[in-house]
Each structure stands twice: as structure tokens, then as C-alpha cells.
Image (cartoon, helix red, strand yellow):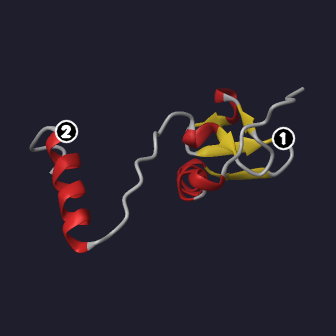
């Protein structure tokens, strides 16, 4: 539906459908989701090369799986105040 119509219309329809069915809705921004290590609070665009995400502490994994984990855990993320 996104390809055939406006993204704003799609978002409105989904919001209305969720509201009608009593489902809670959370909008998650997609900025840096595939270049963020949620385990170590590292955000670096250089960690992603194509389909591979490399965290210097965790190792390698698929970038899309990393982005999905970031989105799934978005509401539980906390900002790092004293970043080195």
C-alpha cells in the first residue's frame, strides 16, 4: 500500500484500525536502527557495510536483524549520559 499511495494515508489507516480494535500503537523512528548496537549503546554508521553489521564488542550479524531488534526494544532503550 505504501507504493500505491501516500505514506501519510497509510499511517492514518493503520492508526484508525488499531484504535478500532483496541490495539496500542507506538511509532518508532527508523533513524540509525541498522547502525546501532543496543547491547553497548554504540551508534556508528561505519558499523554497517552492506548486509553486515559489525559491533567491535559483539561481533557480526545481519544488519536487518539488528535493525529489527533495535525497533523491537525501542521503548526500553535509555540514553547514555556519560558516553566516552
Instruction: Determine which residue is flagged by label 1.
Output: 56
* Residue in view at x 20 percent, y 40 percent: 7
Q: Position of residue 10 (x, y in %)?
A: 18, 48
Describe residue 65's horizontal placement relative to residue 83 as left or right: left
Secondary structure beneath label 1: loop
Residue situated in front as seen by the camera: 34 or 20: 20
Image position, residue 76 (x, y; %): 65, 55
Inter-mark Cα distance, 1 to 2: 38 Å
In-front residue for pair 53/82: 82
The residue positioned farthest toward the right in the image shown: 84
Q: Nearer the viewer, mark 1 or mark 2?
A: 2
State the image coordinates of residue 63 (x, y, percent, origin top left). 58, 47
Circle 2 crowding by C-alpha within 10 Å: few under 14, some 14–19, many from 20 = few
Task: Give the side of residue 54 with respect to residue 71, left or right.
Answer: right
Residue at horizontal 57%, vertical 35%? Answer: 32
Q: Position of residue 54 (x, y in %)?
A: 73, 43
- First in sequence, mark 1 or 2: give its number: 2
Residue for badge 2: 8
Amino acid at each position: 500500500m505504501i507504493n500505491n499511495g501516500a505514506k501519510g494515508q497509510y499511517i492514518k489507516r493503520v492508526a484508525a484500525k488499531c484504535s478500532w480494535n483496541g490495539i496500542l500503537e507506538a511509532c518508532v523512528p527508523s533513524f540509525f536502527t541498522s547502525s546501532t548496537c543496543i547491547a553497548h549503546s554504540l551508534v556508528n554508521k561505519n558499523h554497517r557495510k552492506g548486509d553486515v553489521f559489525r559491533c567491535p564488542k559483539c561481533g557480526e550479524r545481519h544488519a536487518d536483524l539488528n535493525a529489527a531488534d533495535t525497533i523491537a526494544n525501542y521503548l526500553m532503550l535509555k540514553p547514555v549520559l556519560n558516553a566516552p
